[in-house]
Image: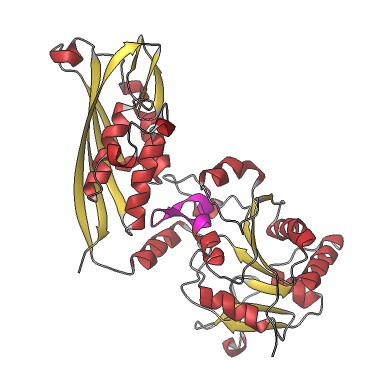
Amino acid sequence: MSTRPKFIAAIIVAAGKGERAQTGDFAEPKQYRRVGGRPVLARTVDAFLAHPAISAVVPVIHADHAERYAALGLENERLREPVSGGPSRQASVLEGLKAIAASRPDLVLIQDAARPFVSVEQIEAVISALASHDGALPTLPLTDTIKRAPDGQLVLTTEDRRTLFAAQTPQGFRFGQIFSAHMRAESVRREFTDDAEIAEWAGLRVAMTAGDRNNFKITHPEDFRRAERHISGDKAMETRVGTGFDVHPFEPGDAVWLGGVRIEHTAKLVGHSDADVALHALTDAILGSIGEGDIGVHFPPTDMQWRGAASTVFLKHAGDLVAKRGGRIVNLDVTIVCEAPRIAKHVPAMCTVISQTLGIKPDRVAIKATTSERLGFTGREEGIVAMASASVEVPRDE
């Protein structure tokens, strides 16, 4: 009876800029964009951590993305510190192999970060195939007729699609063999399309396992719509609406926090956290839409760990609760009532902070400012009021 390899590493390749998936609304690299309320890269990492045989997961990220990666908040004893990638996917994989080499893995699985829906069963199939092969990868048979046209205009011949397959990841190998093959490939300065091609070039035997059409790679903007449909499972959705209201008085100071933006002023707002009245109202609106109480339930003012805390922490928590229910935020509307400071010029920055915190488009956030015509405590410039509403979609209870 064969024994299981003792150490299986997974390298998640996330060092690209994801430019083909970017649009005017989303300039964020695709691996950090959210699908179903959770970043793509986080979903991919979670998929490998969900397999008990994986001993270590090594993310390979772009050198400029350290803050983005840290913001994911990923924590697990099997998750290694991220490694900076190289100028190409091939170079990035090699950096990941070098980073894990000291642990002397028996096997290594190499996964595209942009394939967040890889299943535990697919991972298991690749691991099992490595018991009798040097390498393995999931593939799908081609269903379209394939034409060859060297000039891109005239058909030269029709390929036999029965012998052609589309490659997916994870691609698995015996560690020492693929590490050696990658080092040789680097020395000859040749670029390969994937790790399986490097293995083939090095003379390794690479087996095919069953692919899965849900294990698709997010490459273009429309792929995000497909990803959202996949997560929802085409379940019936219902719209829910929540409202929020908050007020904070002024005290001596030099700035206020509103909508996640610091605005210079002749006073500051009193509060246990940063007293961001706009984000507090908005957080309550989102929590209300899913029946999760109010901000004080989740972040009690008696708890000293929240003293001076940025209110974006509270807002993100509310957004994460929507995501955990399989829901999404449709739109947010905030009204700020004060005589001063002047809000209008800061609205675009506020919308940006809120949209980035929640992973939604900026045009799903509306912020309006008004005065109380010098009436009441706001008119006397004793404090600021904020009101908010939130519309969300969540799966309908059957």
Between 4 and 116, the one lying in front of the other is 4
Residue 259, given in percent of the width and then of the height, sits at 35, 29
**Stretch of the chain drawn in magenta:** 29-42
Q: Is residue 179 above or below residue 88?
A: below
Is the residue 387 above or below the residue 149 in the image? Answer: above
Whether 158 is among the magenta residues is: no
Q: Which of these two is toward me, 260 or 15? A: 260
| Count of number-bearing discs | 0
Q: Position of residue 205 (x, y in %)?
A: 75, 83
Image-quadrant location for residue 130: bottom right
Query: Which image quadrant: the C terminus?
Result: bottom left
Q: Is residue 127 above or below residue 30?
A: below
Residue most extreme to the left: 375
> Would residue 182 be seen by someone viewing this image from the given angle?
yes
In which quadrant will I find the N terminus? bottom right
The residue that appears at 22% across and 63% down in the rendered structure is 396
